[in-house]
Amino acid sequence: MKQLDFRQPAQGAYVSLDDLLGLRFAARELQMKPRKQSHSQMSGGVRTRFRGRGMEFEEVRHYQAGDDIRSIDWRVTARTQVPHTKLFREERERPVIIMLDQRASMFFGGQHCFKSVVAAHAAALMGWVALDNNDRIGALVFNDLEERDIRPKRSRHTLLSVLQAVQGYNEQLQSPLPPANHIPLAQRLSDLRRIAKPGSAIIIISDFNDLDEACDEQLYKLARHGDVSLLNVSDPLEMHLPDNLRLTVSDGQRRRTIDTSNQMFNRSFEQNFSSHMEHLHSLAGQLALPLLNIRTDQAPLLQLQTLFGKQSCRR
């Protein structure tokens, strides 16, 4: 297994499984904590102060308004003629689901690597962080036509299955142009809602290329019951074209030359990207979702530390 320089941008058009496995060392510099109280029955790798219906009996006390009637101790209640409730202390694990976009629009990069590569590295890093935190790790990895969902489990074998799916979908990418019958992001988000249980930590890694009102609705529904974080992947060449150059672009089959001295074209190009980002930032603000921009020209680890660094996770 080759040694990666975690402080440098990712490289290349494709990822290797060895690279994704090697990122477990870098993940030690990251930490994942829920930003709001979990509504699920499983929510962290340590003993919790929350009391509920778990496996370890703690005590019997007088029934209080709001207690689950299923926990009433009928024997003690019958003996004392006063309602009593059983209390349990539980080990609560939080499901962590990583949604990774490996569609055609992600098969693009200007200098260091393709968006699909930096996204895959970010997904692997967060997977290792979740495993180190004793959370249950799952994923929804998809391209333009297919998807694979891996249900959350707390095991290294499950994370390995996630990383294999990431590498497998990544190596299938051949062109930045989607097929005519591609499945939109809104449908993938709807599928994610089916997989993610209430209280799950959900990390969505995508360029949100086709973000629309249908996506907005699905994200709203996800945010109501989960701890959603958005990682938006972009390349500097999408934001601004170099000045006064003739660039040759290709989709793998056809070529076209772009004259960047055409100021009208440049303004239209930049406005298109700005409008997309304004929509995404506005949506994240309305739903109170953390949004982190991941660029291809910077190290994934250093960028993730902005949101998931150990210092930023302290309360």
Image (tube, rainbow, N blue to C red):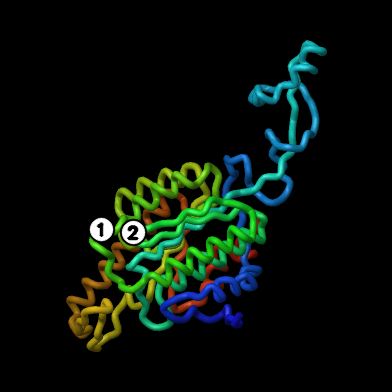
x and y percent of residue 164 in the render? 52, 66
x and y percent of residue 202 in the render? 51, 53
For residue 11, side relative to residue 212 (left or right): right
- Residue receiving disc 2: 145
Please tell me which residue is depicted at 24% across the width and 85% down the height of the picture.
Answer: 248
For residue 92, side relative to residue 194 (left or right): right
CB-based contact (under 8 Å), mark 2 and mark 1: yes
Query: In this view, which residue lies farthest toward the right?
Result: 79
Please tell me which residue is depicted at 30% across the width and 49% down the height of the picture.
Answer: 213
Indicate whether 69 appears above or below 182. above
x and y percent of residue 24 in the render? 62, 70
Label 1 CA crowd tier, 10 Å (few <14, some 14–19, many 20+): few
Q: CA distance from mark 2 to mark 1?
A: 8 Å
Under mark 1, the amino acid is Asn
Indicate whether 83 appears above or below 141. above
- Residue receiving disc 1: 181
x and y percent of residue 296 in the render? 43, 75
Q: Quadrant of the N terminus?
A: bottom right
Indicate whether 94 appears above or below 173. above
At numbered mark 2, what does the secondary structure look like: helix, strand or loop?
loop
At numbered mark 1, what does the secondary structure look like: helix, strand or loop?
loop
- Sequence-wise, which precedes: disc 2 or disc 1? 2
Query: In this view, which residue lies farthest toward the bottom?
Result: 245
In the foreground, 176 or 64: 176
Please tell me which residue is depicted at 25% across the width and 88% down the height of the picture.
Answer: 245
Quadrant of residue 304 within the rendered picture: bottom right
